[in-house]
Image (tube, rainbow, N blue to C red):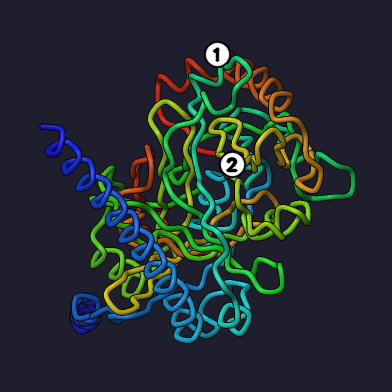
Amino acid sequence: MKTKMLHVITALLFLGMVQSCCTPSATIGSVNNTLRPQETDNWCWAAVTQMMAENEGISISQCDLANHRFSKTNCCNFQNEGQSCPKTNDCNEPGWLELDFAGVNFSESATAQTYAKIKSNIYCGKNVMGYAYGTSGVVGHVVAVRGYVTVGNTNYVVLNDPWAPCHGSERLLTYEEYADPSGTATHWNTWYDTSKK
Amino acid sequence: MKKYLIYLGICALYFTVVQGNAQDRNLQQVIEKGKSDLLEVLAQTGDQFNFDIDAEAVRGSRPAMPISYREMDFEQLLNAEGRIEATLKPESKKVVPLVTNNQVVTTLSVTAKDQGAYEISELINHQYQDELNMLPEEIRQGDFRELTIIYVPNLNTIVYTAGDRSYTTYKGSSVREGIETTALLEVLKTDAVAFQEKYGELLKQGKLVN
């Protein structure tokens, strides 16, 4: 019994050491995460929740998240017969991430994360991060951050953007644009350090 | 005194022209850097990402005229009176199509930062790429001159405006067919009012995303 305990403690210490020793690649890092397009005009929050949950091994649909958020039961209905996307306009409403409901532990911050923190989350933690931005008083947008690339002196973050509806796309923003978006938009929130509950 | 004023005027004109030229040079350099970075990213990342872009097409492309990107002021839209210009905030970035044979291969975005110097802010945007390619031939042949990209918040739609004609996918419209800008503004205003009635109070309570 004593030996067993000793083995467990040694293994935990070893794991902790490995994780704290992880040095992110200076130029490129990625998490293998399937792009999930938003299934209505307004469901970026559901799509990003789905992508972040899937990265933790949790399978959850956007319409189940919408049913929960709007206390409805019909959000999985198709808008057009025979086409699974888009989902019914009856549930086509803006929202916010539903990580807690999806079963994901997370940290969040209203200030932008440093590039070093993003690299560490992606390369070492293999976490998909959430990033919301927008202008005060109007509806914003949220995307999943699943990678980074440095070219010369310019740092880029790679996004799984659920927009456009039923399509989505992978795109790149400079780190500066992530931290301080163009125009009147600002960084709203970053979700990071995720794990399964 | 008159000579002094003339001298001052010439100096002011000289500095305006010099500054304008310097800004143009800076913009061209930033666009070239963006294209070069994109090629580097595509070469470096291999199959780690799926950007859905052909590196050779990017390499062979040239930048078209940078398109001004402006966001609509939702409050102004609620009270709009016929002129779309009056509802727009100042330019927040420029979208630069990279084109080959009249086809947009991808787009870059550049943003004016401190003292008017441009910086690259975004590489790759499939929505702009797809929709710019669907605009009428004369707009594409004209290298997108006179075009403005307008983002309408809350209604979450993009409008491409060239003078009195606008192009959008809003409510099932096609960007291939233009509609009168004033008519579109009326539709947007009506929907903005409905949106405000439904979500106005909710937005005061907290942030929402779509």
- Horizontally, is A63 left or right of B12 in the view? right
Single out the mark in the foreground, 2 or 1.
Answer: 1
Image quadrant containing the N terminus of chain B: top left
Q: Nearer the viewer, residue B198 or A150?
A: A150
- Horizontally, is B27 left or right of A118 in the view? right
Q: Residues within 10 Å of mark 1 (few under 14, many from 20)?
A: few
Viewer can see residue B114: no
Q: Amino acid at mark 2?
A: Leu
B119 to A5, vertically: above or below: above
Image x and y of residue B9, in percent: 22, 40
Which quadrant of the structure image shows residue B158? Answer: top right
Q: Secondary structure at mark 1?
A: loop
A76 to A125, vertically: above or below: above
A36 to B192, vertically: above or below: below
- Horizontally, is B186 left or right of B48 in the view? right
Image x and y of residue B129, in percent: 64, 60
Residue at x 48% of width, y 27% of height:
B73
Q: Secondary structure at mark 2?
A: helix
Kindly identify which chain the residue marked by label 2 belongs to: A
Q: Amino acid at mark 1?
A: Asn
Spatial distance from mark 2 to mark 1, Cα to Cα?
Answer: 35 Å
Kindly identify which chain the residue marked by label 1 belongs to: B
Residue at x 35% of width, y 55% of height:
A177
Residue at x 35% of width, y 54% of height:
A178
Q: Nearer the viewer, residue A65 or A7?
A: A65
Image quadrant containing the C terminus of chain B: top right
The residue beneath circle 2 is A65
Q: Nearer the viewer, residue A62 or B66?
A: B66
The residue beneath circle 1 is B79
